[in-house]
Image: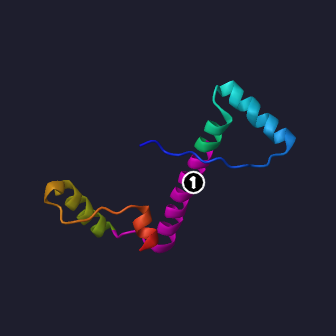
Amino acid sequence: MAQISERINIMFNKDDLLEIKDYCKKKGISFSEFARKTLMKEIREQEEHDLLKFINENCEFVEKEEEKEIKAFLKNYDESQAEFVEVNLNDILQG
């Protein structure tokens, strides 16, 4: 099923708008495509930054012995036998 697009209005000063339009023309993409891709890229980068900040603020480095145990576990890990649940960033932030 095709997604329904929505129209929004964004205000730019004349110089910024001209610069953006010139850039889009050089790249051969529409203004809308450029705006969509740029905004989505910014969101993903910010979410990655937020995750890194969360990890740095809430997780400590492991001791060498614990690191060895983790590496040994991962070496012998068989995903088909796993009793774990995969989580994503949204699961962590909402949990």
Extreme right residue here? 14
User: Compared with residue 4, is residue 54 higher up or lower down, i.e. above or below?
Assistant: below
Q: Is residue 91 magenta?
A: no
- Secondary element under disc 1, as helix, strand or loop, is helix
Main secondary structure of the magenta stretch: helix
Quarter assignment of residue 68: bottom left
Quarter of the image with the N terminus in it? top left
Residue 64 spot, x, y in % from top left: 32, 66
- For image coordinates 26% across by 63% down, the residue present is 70
User: Compared with residue 5, is residue 64 higher up or lower down, i.e. above or below?
Assistant: below
The residue labelled by disc 1 is 43
Bin the neighbour count of mark 1 within 10 Å (Cα to Cα): few under 14, some 14-19, many 20 and up: few
Total of numbered circles in the picture? 1
Side of 52 where 84 appears, left or right: left
- Give the amino acid type for the residue marked by disc 1 in the picture: Ile
Quarter of the image with the C terminus in it? bottom left
- For image coordinates 61% across by 37% down, the residue present is 33
The magenta span reads 38-63
- For image coordinates 40% across by 67% down, the residue present is 91
Side of 39 where 58 appears, left or right: left
Residue 43 spot, x, y in % from top left: 57, 54
User: Compared with residue 19, is residue 44 higher up or lower down, i.e. above or below?
Assistant: below
Q: Nearer the viewer, residue 36 or 83?
A: 36
Extreme left residue here? 81
Q: Nearer the viewer, residue 21 or 41?
A: 21
User: Compared with residue 41, is residue 71 higher up or lower down, i.e. above or below?
Assistant: below
Q: Nearer the viewer, residue 11 or 19?
A: 11
